Image (cartoon, rainbow, N blue to C red):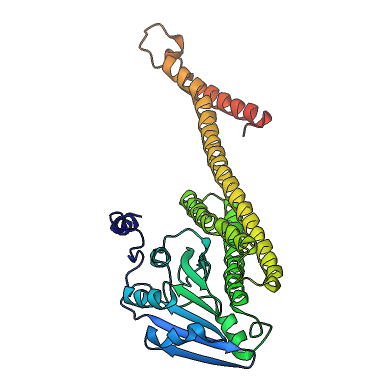
Amino acid sequence: MIAFIKDLSQTLKQPPGTVVHIGDKTNVPVKITVFDYDAGGLEEQELSSIEACFELRDKPSVSWINIDGLHDLRVFEKMHAHFGIHPLVGEDIVNTEQRPKIEDYGDYLFIVVKMMYRPPDSEDIVAEQVSLLVGKNYVLSFQERPGDVFDEIRSRIRQGKGRIRQLGPDYLAYCLLDAIVDNCFSVLEWFSDRVEDLEARLLQEVEPGMAQEIHRWKRNTVLLRKQIWPLREVVSGMQRSGSKLIQKSTDIFLRDLYDHTIQIIDTIESIRDILGGLHDVHLTVVSNRMNEIMKVLTIFASIFIPLTFIAGIYGMNFQNMPELQWRYGYFAVLAFMFLLGISLLSYFKRKNWL
């Protein structure tokens, strides 16, 4: 959080529309891939420079231009000039702490969403920003780093499966959003399994560090909720935008996508309630365990209090105590104390205090 505040402070004194990258710094070159297709064919290529994709803007086919890496601001300066991207859009693309949203700029739609995934070697969930520009015959997608959840879409384009090659860029944008939402289901399935395991372990035995583990899962739930809730607004905004870029044939798919986002939100809320209950259960189990310990200690104290009282009486240094001169006084007192302790234990057991 401290690093984010330092990066964000770079934009505080800048005029609106100033392109300043806020996010992870990397030396990896920007990767530009292009899928240019229509119902009759496909041209797939990886470009060495951003200028090579400028001619695709006015082609009648659908062009999906994907850019991995937001750190090279020269790429965005050239794209802004050629595609007519508003300076505020460019500022939002390179600021990777944007809230998911949709904005209609007339000639194109600007969409910001969060792609949720779990790194293979981590128990945490990562939210990567994906920005989409949906134009008349193109879709520009901007990602923070290489690697995404769009491999299935690329496969469908290559093989011509489904209707993706027959429809326009609005349907392609829907497919990209649908892939992001579907991947959320995978993340939530893994998340639910971990929460169920945690619940089973908690009900068996309280382990050291379990409170911190519950807190970590609750923090991940807050992250999920923060990134998924606005996604519902994005999909709803595409439905109600009235933009000429969204065809009526795409509306039914957007309605289905909206239902999926609602389902994800309901699942997140359920997990959140379960984790809140687990936190209460953890406190209750710890409290009950402490009560059991205090109960045992209290029983032992109750047994030894009368024994200590007897020992205290015969420990007084008085001369006229007849039992002190009796030959079997010591053994008689020990036997009495032993019988008294057994009697108290029997009494506590009959009362189900043991």
Note whether 18 is above or below 353 in the view shown: below
Q: Answer whether residue 139 is visible to the viewer in this image.
A: yes
Q: Viewer-proximal residue, 19 or 296?
A: 19
Q: Viewer-proximal residue, 330 or 32?
A: 32
Q: Answer whether residue 203 is visible to the viewer in this image.
A: no
Residue 273: x percent and y percent?
Answer: 61, 48
Residue at the spot x=69%, y=68% of the render?
251
Residue 92: x percent and y percent?
Answer: 42, 63
Q: Quadrant of the N terminus?
A: bottom left
Q: Quadrant of the C terminus?
A: top right
Residue 86: x percent and y percent?
Answer: 42, 67
Note whether 151 is above or below 210 in the view shown: below
Q: Viewer-proximal residue, 333 or 95?
A: 95
Q: Quadrant of residue 163?
A: bottom right
- Count of marks, rendered view: 0
Residue 125: x percent and y percent?
Answer: 49, 63
Q: Viewer-proximal residue, 264 or 248?
A: 248
Q: Is residue 254 left or right of residue 33?
A: right
Q: Quadrant of residue 194?
A: bottom right
Residue at the spot x=57%, y=23% of the render?
340
